[in-house]
Image (cartoon, coloured by chain):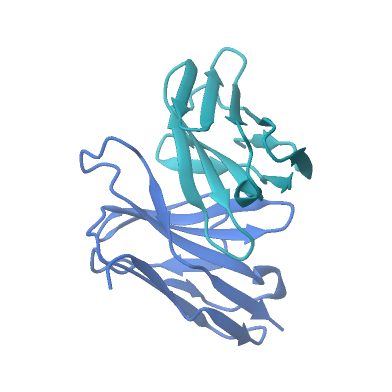
Chain colours: A cyan, B blue
Amino acid sequence: QKEVEQNSGPLSVPEGAIASLNCTYSDRGSQSFFWYRQYSGKSPELIMFIYSNGDKEDGRFTAQLNKASQYVSLLIRDSQPSDSATYLCAVKAGNQFYFGTGTSLTVIP
Amino acid sequence: DAGITQSPRYKITETGRQVTLMCHQTWSHSYMFWYRQDLGHGLRLIYYSAAADITDKGEVPDGYVVSRSKTENFPLTLESATRSQTSVYFCASSSWGSGAPVEEQYFGPGTRLTVT
């Protein structure tokens, strides 16, 4: 059973702060790592992907990957109320994608 | 319209009935997926397809059947619906395997299925 674990939250941060979301995975053979954002009642949408150890930055988002520790994180800088959503960590192993249960983030104005 | 669509968006059915959920994508993506999303379990893969006439099981395939006779369509059938299959079902497609640089999945709007 391949597992992807996330803190379910809810995580609340004030507007302008940094939100830190964490994810661990069980399969050392996992190849690719993704963060999806899902607004309530909507479908998931990809916001970040990372394939190599280290940091990857895209605007206010930074994904961090540590394969030795089997750990992926997402940092959201200058958090905005529009960032309030559930964030899903996803891991690709073989031909399949495995999702965590998601972390609910609320950004307080 | 371009994109990925699902129908119906909402469905109520009775235990034991057969139900088919439809998924259609206009991008000619090779890969298509069916997920269910339940509180406490997140998204779980039911079945996926790498191309027309090629399908494979995911994490939770029991009670479901899929087919893919055309690249753009990937229907999911619940042969005899049970209450435990009450869920939100998402179809997704991906250009992964066609030389795309990112293994991004594009999700449809979802079908909310209630089995009474």
- Residue at coordinates 21% horizontally, 38% vertically from top-left? B99
Above/below status of A103 relative to B32: above
- Residue at coordinates 62% horizontally, 86% vertically from top-left? B13
Instruction: Indicate the quadrant containing the N terminus of chain B: top left, top right, bottom left or bottom right.
Output: bottom left
Quadrant of residue A39 within the rendered picture: bottom right
- Residue at coordinates 75% horizontally, 38% vertically from top-left? A13
**x and y percentages locating residue A93 in the rendered image:** 46, 33
Left-right relation of B77 to A9: left
Res. A9 in view: no
How many numbered dots are placed on residues in this image? 0
Question: Front-most of A64 and B46?
Answer: A64
Question: Front-most of A79 and B15?
Answer: A79
Above/below status of B113 relative to B40: below
**x and y percentages locating residue A101 in the rendered image:** 67, 46
Question: Front-most of A52 and A45?
Answer: A45
Left-right relation of B102 to A73: left
**x and y percentages locating residue B21 in the rendered image:** 46, 76
Instruction: Indicate the quadrant containing the C terminus of chain B: top left, top right, bottom left or bottom right.
Output: bottom right
**x and y percentages locating residue B90 in the rendered image:** 50, 63
Res. B93 in view: yes
Q: Residue furthest top?
A: A68
